[in-house]
Image: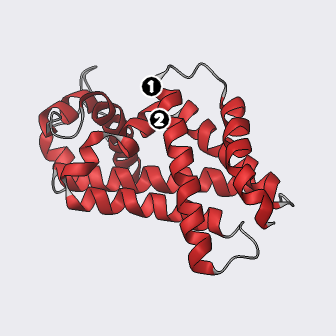
Amino acid sequence: MSATATVRMPAARRREQLLDIALGIFARNGYHETSMNALAAEAGVTKPVLYQHFASKRELFAQLLARTGDRLHSAIAERSAGVDTPRQRVEVGFAAFFHFFDEHPDAFSVLYGSSLGSVPEFKREARRVQDTFTAILARLINGVDGDDALVMAAGINGIAEGMVRYWMHEGRRHSADEMATLTTRLAWGGLEDLS
């Protein structure tokens, strides 16, 4: 076997590798400016190999969005498990949120980038990510009917999104924990009267 031969990987592992590489490329270039040729070249595979795993660039990006959103929600759920008080759950949830994007800045670019606005299925997937986060927050709001809790949680989600956008665009000058504390202080000011 020559030194330049492509290593054959199990399909599931190759798919994960392709998604990891695609995350970086889409974050850097955006959806429309990224080609399947560029993705294949960066992954060190042929275009037919890429098409064995993803029928199109659109499918690849949609799956990347879903996987990234699921990873964000898992990170929040893992850190929040076993936390007792609503305030602690809010703070730990925000800490997981900011740590996730601190450790995976490309995920921020993909989930909150401008590519999402132009393709309906991408908007739906981004909305699913936001709705899941909103539902997590709504469960922490006591003494308020379910619909009102969702409305308030959507507002808190907007606060978190605004703060993470500012933080990322300003070069993450605060630590993830500092951002979680600031976001909790701002969000909890409104929630405190409800608990």
- Give the percent coordinates (x, y) of residue 168: 49, 28
Q: Quadrant of residue 142?
A: bottom right
Tell me the kind of residue under disc 1: His
- Give the percent coordinates (x, y) of residue 75: 62, 50
Q: Are marks 1 and 2 in contact (CB under 8 Å)?
A: yes
Q: Which residue is mark 1?
A: 169
- Give the percent coordinates (x, y) of residue 119: 19, 55
Callout 2: helix, strand or loop?
Answer: helix
Of the 4 image quadrants, the one containing the C terminus is bottom right
On screen, 81 above or below 110?
A: below
- Give the percent coordinates (x, y) of residue 99: 63, 36
On screen, 20 above or below 155?
A: above
Please state if 18 lies on the left or on the right of 89 as rendered: left
Tell me the kind of residue under disc 2: Arg
On screen, 92 above or below 3?
A: below
Q: Which residue is mark 2?
A: 165
Pick out the residue farthest to the right.
84
Marker count (numbered): 2
How far is disc 1 from disc 2 in space, using C-alphas? 6 Å
